Amino acid sequence: MGRDKALLPVGGRPLLARLIGELREAVTGEIVVAVSSPEREVAYRSLLGPLPGGVSFLLDRQQDAGPVAGLAAGLAALPDGYAYATACDTPELSRQWLMRLLREAEASGAPAVAAQNEPLHALYHTGLARLAERALADGDYRLMSLLRRAGAVELTLTEQEKAAYGLYNLNTPEQYETYLANKPHKIEE
């Protein structure tokens, strides 16, 4: 992308601020934003301003270890239960997807539930913090590997279902521009 995706403007706000707002409306409990460095936390705090109650920043357990490091930090910091993990470049949050994940977790008792090949639109039990720590110690920084080691339920979805649930990320400038061109956004004051 060439720039920090969390700070991409969408509807007059940084993408991360928009995502935090949507999460605040959709979930109960704490929202943890895992960051890879103290400098990134300072940058986010300066741009986001005061955070809503129940939102905090945590440093990754290990620098340069990707999302597994952030997931390990977040799961370890949260109370016992399930946590939804998403990426900062996720432009849409689907309550229907969250509810489907919760239903699957309750029905299966699985420690994690995700769409096939979508580890950052997934539900993880906080008890997986130790397994994430072990993956970091082993040098295995792939979330898909963690899901498989955990015995996660992986849901098979069509591309249409993935789009309907908002299971996509803005990884390239082209994806970002296409998203902005096709999605109406209200400018928030």
Image: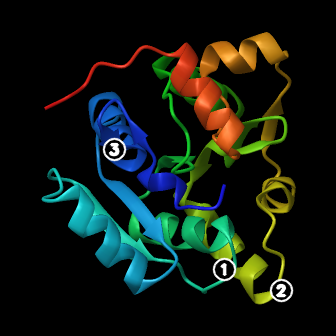
At x 12%, y 59%, the residue is 50
Q: Amino acid at mark 2?
A: Asp
Residue 20 is labelled as 3
At x 13%, y 32%, the residue is 189
Residue at mark 1: 133
Q: Is residue 91 above or below residue 63?
A: above
At x 25%, y 25%, the residue is 187
- Element at label 1: helix
x, y percentage for residue 114?
Answer: 72, 38
x, y percentage for residue 111?
Answer: 67, 49
> Along the polypeptide, which appears first: circle 2 or circle 3?
3
Residue 56, located in which quarter of the rendered image? Answer: bottom left
Contact between labelled residues 3 and 2, with CB atoms less than 8 Å apart: no
User: Separation of disc 2 and disc 3 at Cα?
Assistant: 32 Å
> Along the polypeptide, which appears first: circle 1 or circle 2?
1
Residue at mark 2: 138
